[in-house]
């Protein structure tokens, strides 16, 4: 899981350091950078598993869109310093990329574990190397300009014993499901063939469900029925040229009717997507979700959080989400499990609520609301969402900075 991350010059964030738990939700005013945090993490995924161009194309962004506008002098660098806890190890990964002639290139990268540097690269220098754990040797990295992370060239199957930390980082991000652009419109459009992922905007949901065995589809149906008793089953439908659409069936008074993807409500489509996360092929990664309450009735939020928590534990994944719903916060954290006498920054609970806000200088700041003793005291008689709803952003900031 990601324990902490320092982000420099990325979009609305400027310079931001934040810590995460296995079950983290981000809150804050509009335009403070909640979505930018998810995109920064997705950008790191592209560093070691894909390409920068693909990241930009999927989100309809240009390289210029990724640079912070907060700095007086526009720098051409993006820097990330990430602490991960993977396979029982705390691993530090630092990476800096720069823009040249409209393209991103690797400027510097370092991975360290237990006081040992296992990857060191600086563009233009000849002393770059990877540490081989099997041979106990530093292997030189070929001099030159790289268009992506050195981690990307690591074969996680054949080279996991030689480069265990690099393999662990690549595997974690490879197993990450980024749904920060989940779109009911795209979920209705369908996709071709089979898929082991839901797709960035959920466009592969029908193909994903189609490949599930009957037992998994039945389990999925039962989860969805908890939200809508009339719901009967998912019914992926194959059209011409292997286009798979997500249709459903609903039952009223003993009569079952087919509902085409075009007529499924936005909220139900999002519920289907969230419940489907239980059946992801790989475990041990992370799931990124933006504005998870969007389109979902308030009375279903407790159940939604319950299912997401089950998925987080069953699949051993980290869930990082954003929300504007104070009601959802009541269910995200069990206030009975928050030790009111313990500084949460030292002994965090598995769940956390991070408030993002801007300093007077315009820089993004992120803090766990339970780091504040005065806010923790309110848990004696209020729920988390009630606390946030009854305090202005300024009052929350004062409590966290006081």
Image: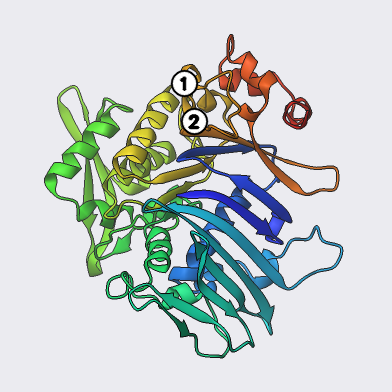
Q: Which residue is mark 2?
A: 349
Q: Is residue 164 left or right of residue 292?
A: left
Quadrant of the image occupied by residue 267: top left
For residue 337, the mark is 1
Can I make out residue 232 in this image?
A: no
Q: Residue at x 59, y 89 (%)?
A: 126
Q: Residues within 10 Å of mark 1 (few under 14, many from 20)?
A: few
Q: Is residue 84 above or below residue 98?
A: above
The residue at the far left in this view is 214
The residue at the far top in this view is 381
Q: Nearer the viewer, residue 174 or 304?
A: 174
Mark 2 element type: loop
Task: Locate residue 379, reporting x and y percent.
Answer: 58, 15
Can I make out residue 398 in this image?
A: yes
Task: Locate residue 281, reporting x and y percent.
Answer: 26, 54
Quadrant of the image occupied by residue 122: bottom right
Task: For marks 2 and 1, give the CA distance.
Answer: 8 Å
Q: Is residue 135 above or below residue 394?
A: below
Q: Is residue 28 above or below residue 154?
A: above
Q: Is residue 284 left or right of residue 257?
A: right
Q: Are marks 2 and 1 in contact (CB under 8 Å)?
A: yes
Quadrant of the image occupied by residue 368: top right
Task: Locate residue 5, reporting x and y percent.
Answer: 59, 53
Q: Is residue 340 left or right of residue 77?
A: left
Q: Nearer the viewer, residue 18 or 327?
A: 18
């Amino acid at each position: 899981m990601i324990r902490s991350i320092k982000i420099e010059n990325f979009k609305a964030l400027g310079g931001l350091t934040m810590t995460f738990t296995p079950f983290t939700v981000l809150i804050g005013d509009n335009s403070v950078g909640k979505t930018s945090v998810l995109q920064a993490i997705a950008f790191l995924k592209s560093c070691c598993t894909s390409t920068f161009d693909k990241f930009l194309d999927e989100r309809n962004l240009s390289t210029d869109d990724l640079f912070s506008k907060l700095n007086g002098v526009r720098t051409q660098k993006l820097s990330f310093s990430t602490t991960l806890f993977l396979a029982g190890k705390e691993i530090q990964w630092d990476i800096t990329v720069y823009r040249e002639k409209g393209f991103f290139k690797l400027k510097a990268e370092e991975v360290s574990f237990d006081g040992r540097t296992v990857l060191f690269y600086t563009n233009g220098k000849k002393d770059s190397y990877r540490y081989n754990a099997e041979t106990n040797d530093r292997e030189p990295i070929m001099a030159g300009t790289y268009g992506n992370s050195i981690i990307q060239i690591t074969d996680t199957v054949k080279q996991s014993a030689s480069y265990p930390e690099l393999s662990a980082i690549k595997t974690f991000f490879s197993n990450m499901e980024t749904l920060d652009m989940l779109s009911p419109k795209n979920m209705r459009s369908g996709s071709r063939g089979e898929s082991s992922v839901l797709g960035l905007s959920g466009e592969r949901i029908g193909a994903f469900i189609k490949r599930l065995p009957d037992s998994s589809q039945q389990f999925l149906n039962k989860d969805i029925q908890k939200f809508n008793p009339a719901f009967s089953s998912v019914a992926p439908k194959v059209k011409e040229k292997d286009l798979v659409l997500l249709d459903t069936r609903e039952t009223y008074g003993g009569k079952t009717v087919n509902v085409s993807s075009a007529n499924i409500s936005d909220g139900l489509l999002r519920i289907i997507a969230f419940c489907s996360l239980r059946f992801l092929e790989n475990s041990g990664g992370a799931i990124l979700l933006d504005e998870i309450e969007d389109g979902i009735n308030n009375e279903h939020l407790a159940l939604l959080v319950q299912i997401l928590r089950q998925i987080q534990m069953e699949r051993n994944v980290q869930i990082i989400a954003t929300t504007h719903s104070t009601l959802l916060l009541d269910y995200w954290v069990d206030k009975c499990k928050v030790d009111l006498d313990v500084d949460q920054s030292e002994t965090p609970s598995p769940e956390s609520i991070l408030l993002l806000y801007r300093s007077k200088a315009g820089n993004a700041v992120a803090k766990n609301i339970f780091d504040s003793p005065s806010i923790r005291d309110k848990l004696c008689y209020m729920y988390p969402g009630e606390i946030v709803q009854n305090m202005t952003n300024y009052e929350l900031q004062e409590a966290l900075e006081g």
